[in-house]
Amino acid sequence: MKKRNARRARLLRPTDGLLPLVFILVSALGRSSVAERVYLSTLFPALFALASARGLRIAFSEQPSMRRVAGSVKLALALQFIGALAFLVIDLIRNRGQFVLSNALFITVGMLLNIEHVFYEYLFATGDDASAVRVRIITAALTAAGIMMTSPASGGGALPYALEWLLGGAAMAAVVSAVIGRGVGGRLKGRVNNRVLKCAPLAIVQSAIYPLVWMLALMLLRPVMFDGITAVPFFAGLMVYELSRAPFRRDGRESKGFNIAMLIVAVIGIGLASIHYVPAAQEFLLNFIGKWSHEIPAAGVMIAAAAVCSFGMYGGIGSRE
């Protein structure tokens, strides 16, 4: 009984939601555009790296040997550099060969956060959940501080937009995660294996599906309830989606509670979105929280959308042995 309960507890990692929570907070404090850019600078290099940081969790669930795990980690680390370089090349092409320092700095920040993600997953694979939690708390704090220290003016610091703070925080997060990862798991001695490449198609879909839904929502609903909002609704849904992650599709027994939870979350999201069509509720919120009242219906849409994405990617119907 104890073993079964422990397994169920591991299906939810609260720290998966820390970075989305940071993005929500800094967006609410006036750094929405920076939070969006940090997220996108993490997402696109990750996709060019074949979503290998996310794919590690899937790979680890199929690799009982720590040598195999270490081999997957080594390949994933190499792919983070390749993904960042590929995205930098795309950025150069987009800018007709002109090197934009601020873009390169944001891409570097994204790469460093993806490296931290690799070691975060590795620490969970070693069984040292406490160290993984500490690493992600440190990363969240450093990322929040770095974003808040950025400057709206391009010349606000030693680097454009005072990005030295964000870059330094991301570098520190990557170094701390690597040091703790090596201290807990030792040297990465395993032979490089291609398990993360085999997991790449699913990992890429898992990484891209929710941002694609956000783009669709912007196209369809911007005139209705998505006009003039910050990135808070997007990150609210992202937190739901990230908290739903599991290393595998749950079987029928594990999915029952998860499916019910996602249904409840979707209903809550629909309820929040419905406020847009209730004038009395709109007026009350406008008087109570001011301009933020416009964010709530959009957040409801994205929370409901995230619940649907979560069910599709991490839920399951029926029993699979």
Image: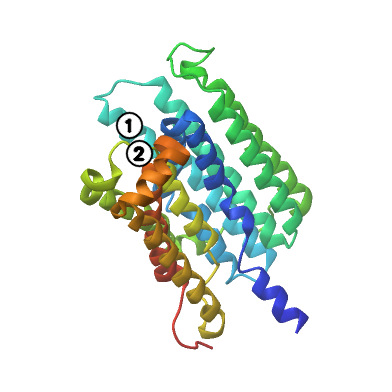
**Residue located at (44% from left, 34% from top):** 32
The image quarter containing residue 273 is bottom left
- The spot of residue 111 in percent (x, y) is 50, 38
- The spot of residue 157 in percent (x, y) is 53, 13
What number is the disc on residue 243?
A: none
What number is the disc on residue 91?
A: 1
Report the mark closest to the observer, 2 or 1: 2
Q: How is the model colour-coded? A: rainbow
Viewer-side residue, 204 vs 270: 270
Q: Quadrant of the C terminus?
A: bottom right
Q: Which residue is mark 2?
A: 229
Viewer-side residue, 234 vs 171: 234
**Residue located at (77% from left, 80% from top):** 2
Query: Can you see residue 84?
Result: no
Label 2 to label 1: alpha-carbon separation: 27 Å
Query: Can you see residue 244?
Result: yes
